[in-house]
Image: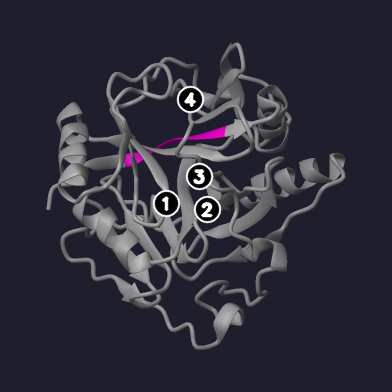
């Protein structure tokens, strides 16, 4: 199977205060604002023009961007989506600095924008000052859907992604793109919503710095540190100003034997206290179990 998606692209979130939300992400995690146009604010942690965009709105998820392998791959995703009877919201880019896109609704309500590569026109991460930890990149998203089997089939058949791990047919699933990282899309069963978006950091010291930055704002981590079973990454989570969780992690698995890799099925008989969710043993907090923020198909 030929991959259509190369890597995680970006997230677009509406906010009552886009500038304030952007400043919060800069202060806590360490992205930088690359451009502001009226009530739209673009942020990045590397040489891409943007990885996060805040627009004026009600604190909902507008789209999760997936960077396609080519313009032809964008066309193919659109063709497959229409063939499967899915709703295509638009075929023009939501933002700047990429040429082609298609925005569609996945089974269960998650909204994705499949797009050509975002322009790499920014300085490298060492070329800016920030109180945050300066991540490598935006890493993945996790969204909830009532039927993860249907959502998973969408990831495979429409997006051309591959299953890395699962907890069962109707449980959690993790899907990877061409770049080989364990997952670009993760999913869990529940009310439709964007549960979290995640950044790839460099070290445990970075995760500690983010936790320290939260204390300066009289806030705290929602969960972590811990190490996930599926994906193997060390993680922390906090809530952004809209109630969506932000995961910061290191050491996410990268699958280098794509042709022979077999997806694992994790035993979840121990429930949320099981090692499949946290190898270090601490179960998630009640706040972590909330569905996140709703997707907005009307934006």
Q: State the CA–CA distance, disc 1 to disc 2.
A: 8 Å
Say which quarter of the image contains residue 91.
Answer: top left
Q: Which residue is mark 3?
A: 295
Q: Residues within 10 Å of mark 4 (few under 14, many from 20)?
A: many
Q: Position of residue 61 (x, y in %)?
A: 53, 40
Residue ID for mark 1: 109
Whichever of labels 2 and 4 marks the residue nearer the N terminus, that label is 4
Q: Are marks 1 and 4 in contact (CB under 8 Å)?
A: no
The magenta segment is 7-13
| Label 1: which secondary element | loop
Does any portion of residue 29 appear in the rendered image? yes
User: Judging from the image, what secondary structure is the residue with disc 4 in?
Assistant: loop
For residue 193, the mark is 2
> Magenta segment: does it hold 9?
yes
On whether residue 209 falls in the magenta region, the answer is no
Left or right: residue 279 compared with residue 77: right
Cβ atoms at labels 1 and 3 below 8 Å apart: yes
Q: Are marks 1 and 2 in contact (CB under 8 Å)?
A: yes
């Amino acid at each position: 199977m030929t991959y259509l998606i190369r890597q995680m692209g970006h997230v677009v979130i509406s906010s009552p205060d886009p500038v304030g939300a952007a400043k919060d992400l800069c202060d806590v995690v360490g992205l930088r604002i690359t451009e502001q146009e009226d009530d739209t604010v673009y942020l990045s942690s590397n040489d891409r023009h943007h990885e996060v965009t805040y627009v004026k709105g009600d604190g909902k998820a507008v789209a999760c961007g997936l960077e396609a392998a080519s313009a032809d791959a964008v066309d193919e995703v659109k063709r497959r989506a229409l063939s499967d009877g899915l709703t295509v919201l638009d075929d023009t880019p939501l933002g700047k600095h990429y040429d082609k896109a298609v925005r569609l609704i996945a089974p269960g309500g998650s909204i994705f924008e499949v797009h050509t590569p975002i322009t790499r026109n920014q300085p490298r991460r060492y070329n800016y000052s920030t109180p945050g930890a300066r991540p490598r990149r935006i890493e993945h998203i996790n969204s909830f859907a009532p039927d993860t089997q249907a959502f998973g089939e969408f990831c495979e058949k429409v997006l051309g992604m591959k299953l890395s791990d699962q907890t069962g047919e109707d449980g959690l699933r993790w899907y990877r793109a061409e770049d080989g990282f364990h997952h670009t899309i993760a999913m869990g069963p529940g009310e439709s919503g964007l549960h979290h978006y995640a950044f790839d950091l460099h070290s445990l010291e970075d995760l500690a710095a983010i936790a320290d930055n939260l204390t300066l704002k009289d806030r705290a981590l929602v969960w972590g540190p811990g190490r996930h079973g599926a994906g193997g990454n060390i993680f922390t989570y906090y809530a952004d100003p809209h109630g969506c969780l932000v995961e910061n992690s290191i050491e996410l698995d990268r699958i280098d034997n794509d042709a022979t890799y077999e997806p694992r099925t994790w035993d979840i008989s121990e429930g949320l206290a099981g090692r499949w969710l946290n190898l270090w043993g601490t179960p998630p907090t009640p706040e972590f179990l909330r569905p996140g923020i709703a997707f907005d198909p009307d934006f």
